[in-house]
Amino acid sequence: MNQRVTDYLNGVFTPYNGVKSVNELKSDLHTDLQERFRELKAEGKDDETAFKMTIDSIGDIEQTILEVANLSRSLERQVLTNFSGSNLVNSDFAGVKAHKGRFNASALHGSDFSGADLTGSTFKSSDVREANFDGANLTDCTLSTLDLTNASFNKTILVRTNFSKSGLDGAKFTNVRLTDVTLTLTDLRKTTFESCVFDGVDFKYTDLTGQRLDGQTFIGVKFDKAALTEVSFNGATLNNVSFQPGFTLTNKYYRMIKTINFDGATMDKLTFAHLKGMGADLSKAKVI
C-alpha cells in the first residue's frame, strides 16, 4: 500500500468527514487507486511517476465528492423531516427548522412546536390535541382533517395555512394575523379567537354559531354559506367582507343574519350595503 496515495485521499476528503455516502466513495476509491499504483509499479514506473499517473487517473475528484456530499445531505434532510405514521406523543420540536416536514397520520398529542419553522409542512389526519404552536411559522402548512383540540396558536405565523375539516374544539388563536388562511367546513363553535386580524380568510361552510369575534379585524374575509347564528362582531372592523348565502337569500339565512350583533362595528360602504340588503341590524354600526 502506498502511503502517499492514502495521505492524498485523506486530505481531499477531510471536509466531508461523517457524510456516509462520501465515506463509502473514499473507501472504494482508495482500493482502486492502490491497485492502479501497484499496476504502474509493475510496469516499471518509478514511485513519483506512478503516484502522479495514479492521481491524474481520477480527474477532478473534488467536484465529484462535492456533488455526492450535497446529494447525501439533501437525502438525509428528507429522511429527517418525514415523521409520518409515527408515535410522537409529547415530543419536543420547540425551535426546530423543518421545512416541508411530513407529520401525516402521526400521534402528536401534547407535542411542543413553539417557535419552530415548519414552512410547507403537512399534518394530515394526525392527532395533534393540546399541541403548542405558539410563535411557530406555519406558512403554507396543511393541518386539514386532523384533531387540534385544545391546541395553542399564540403569535403564530399563519400564512396560507389550511385548517379545513379539522377539529378545533378548545383551540386558542391569540395575537395572530391569519393571512389567506383556509378554515372551510370546520366547526369553530368552541374555538377561541382573541386580538386577531383576519386577512383573506375563508370561512365558507364553517359553523361559527355563538362565536364572539368582538373588536377584531376582518379584511377581505369570506363568510359565505357559514353558520353565523348569534355571532358577535361588537366593535369589530370589517372591510370588504362577504356574507353570501348561496344562489338565493332564503328565509332561514335571512333570519340568521338578523341574529348577528354588529353593535359598534366599523365597516366600509360596500360591506354595509351588502349586510343591510340582507336585513342585518346595523343601527349601531359605523360606516367608513
Image (cartoon, rainbow, N blue to C red):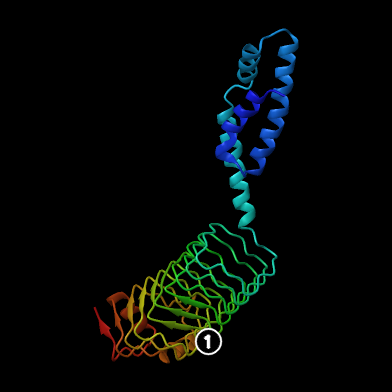
Image height of 84 relative to 222, above or below: above
Q: Does the image show residue 224?
A: no
- Which residue of the protein is positioned furthest toward the left in this rendering? 288
Residue situated in front as seen by the camera: 218 or 17: 17
Residue found at x 66% / y 10%: 46
Q: Does the image show residue 46?
A: yes
Kind of element beneath mark 1: loop
Horizontal and vertical percent for residue 66? 56, 35
> Left or right of 59: which side holds 236?
left
> Left or right of 258: which side holds 190?
right
> Left or right of 65: which side holds 197?
left
Image height of 8 relative to 212, above or below: above
Please tell me in which quadrant of the rendered image residue 158 appears. Answer: bottom left
Quadrant of the snapshot with the N terminus: top right
Residues packed near mark 1 inside 10 Å, few (<14), some (14 to 19) or many (20 plus): some
Horizontal and vertical percent for residue 64? 59, 31
> Left or right of 11: which side holds 84?
right
Residue type at the position of mark 1? Lys
Residue situated in front as seen by the camera: 73 or 156: 73
Residue found at x 55% / y 38%: 15
Horizontal and vertical percent for residue 123? 60, 66
Q: Residue tagged by mark 1?
A: 190
Horizontal and vertical percent for residue 159? 44, 65
Residue situated in front as seen by the camera: 278 or 218: 218
Please tell me in which quadrant of the rendered image residue 231 appears. Answer: bottom left
Image height of 80 relative to 269, above or below: above
Quadrant of the snapshot with the C terminus: bottom left
